[in-house]
Image: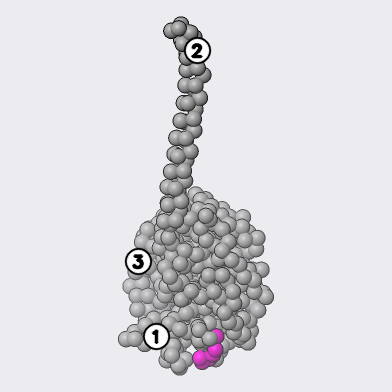
Amino acid sequence: MQAIIRRVLIPLLIITLPISAMIAYTLYYRKAKQHRAAQDTQIVSSLTFGTKHWESFRGNPAQTGTSEGQLPIRLSVKWKFTAKDAVKSTPVVKDGKVFVTSSDKNIYCLSLDNGEIIWTYTAGDSIEASALVIDKTVYVGSEDRILYAIDAEQGLPVWTCKTGGKITGSVNYRTVNSSTELFAGSYDGLLTCLDARTGTKKWSYEAQNYINGSPAIGSGLAAFGSCDANLYMVPLDDPNSAKAFDSGSYIAASPAIANGKIYFGNFDGQFFCVDIETGKDLWAYKDSKHAFFSSPAVNEHYVVVGCRDKKVYCFEAMTGKPLWTFLAGAEVDSSPVLCGEQILVGSSDGKLYCLSVANGTLNGSFDAASAILSGPAIADNCILIACEDGTVYALQQSK
């Protein structure tokens, strides 16, 4: 009897033990995979980037082009909106609304949630400048030589101010004793200071040629470039004591103020760091032979800027030491944004690139299929980009 049992049970054990082991392994693998997936989902969902608002062209009055958080590597389209003509400006965000200007003469107010139009305001001519949103008012200049103040909730005009030349750069601001002042440059060569509430002109400072970009506001002054090749440093409380730095070629891009210094590039492919106190350059990069139309992103360690030689440059902020370059597929007029350890920048090749700030490694990209001339905006876990074909994308983290 025992012999019979051994003859029956031993083969059964030989057969069933491997099967049982395989079943146990399968169950363990599935559970481990589900656990890893849950961990991955938890990690992905924990990524946050940008504050609630991106109120101006470069995110802040000093125009440093910096944001908070950790950018996702994979992006998906949350929504897209198409204007009737090119969008050359950076979208701005305030209170769940996105404000977009276009060459079709319109200022669009869109929902950040779904991209639907809330209101539209039509100016007298094309608009290249990004909007500025302070409190409940939108400020934007147009090629019709008019600076518009528009109610952000209703899209109704608050006031207008006529200037002597078209306005292609964004309006900037400062708040002093609960009073907000606006600063706008125009093609009449004037930087004008206005009362934000009424549009009344307070003072003007005259350059010797067009003012193409937006003035950076910080350290008690307005810094802006002109087509007369000068970088102007105008004290806001004493504009008559302004300094000028001759860069040698006209300045189309907007500067940034950080670390007690002003960073900007010119049309001859030279990039400068100018000391605010002395008005003299601390370092300069002069090896590029192509124009800088991009405005730099700056923090205490890095300066990142695009160039028309198709490259993105990264310099050490204090010394100007070149750290790396990244070669895009076409010109980089787009102004980069620094977010955590990464950089977002667009190109005329239609791509938005996500680069490592440490070494310029490509971490990811999004193909918009049309030239991206303006800088991205980052707000409320959304990345907003605008394209030459008039399309505006809201990008979010892929799920």
Provide the residue span drawn in magenta.
155-160
Image vertical order of residue 374 relative to residue 102, above or below: above
Q: Is residue 307 visible?
A: no
Image vertical order of residue 355 relative to residue 55, above or below: above
Q: Which quadrant of the figure contains the N terminus?
A: top left
Dot label at residue 8: 2
Q: Which residue is mark 1?
A: 180
Which residue is drawn at the image coordinates 42% and 51% (left, top)? 43
Q: Earlier in the sequence, mark 3 or mark 2?
A: 2
Image vertical order of residue 362 relative to residue 227, above or below: above
Q: Which residue is mark 3?
A: 259
The location of residue 26, given as percent across then percent down, is 49, 33
Which residue is drawn at the image coordinates 54% and 83% (left, top)? 141
Question: Is 382 included in the stretch rendered in magenta?
Answer: no
Q: Nearer the viewer, mark 2 or mark 1?
A: 2
Please tell me how crowded label 2 is: few (under 14), some (14-19), or many (20+) other residues with Cα within 10 Å: few
The location of residue 127, given as percent across then percent down, is 60, 79
Which residue is drawn at the image coordinates 56% and 58% (left, top)? 76
Of 175 and 165, the residue lying toward us: 175
Q: Earlier in the sequence, mark 2 or mark 1?
A: 2
Residue 120 figure quarter: bottom right
Tell me the distance, in whole angstroms, between the alpha carbons under discs 3 and 1: 24 Å
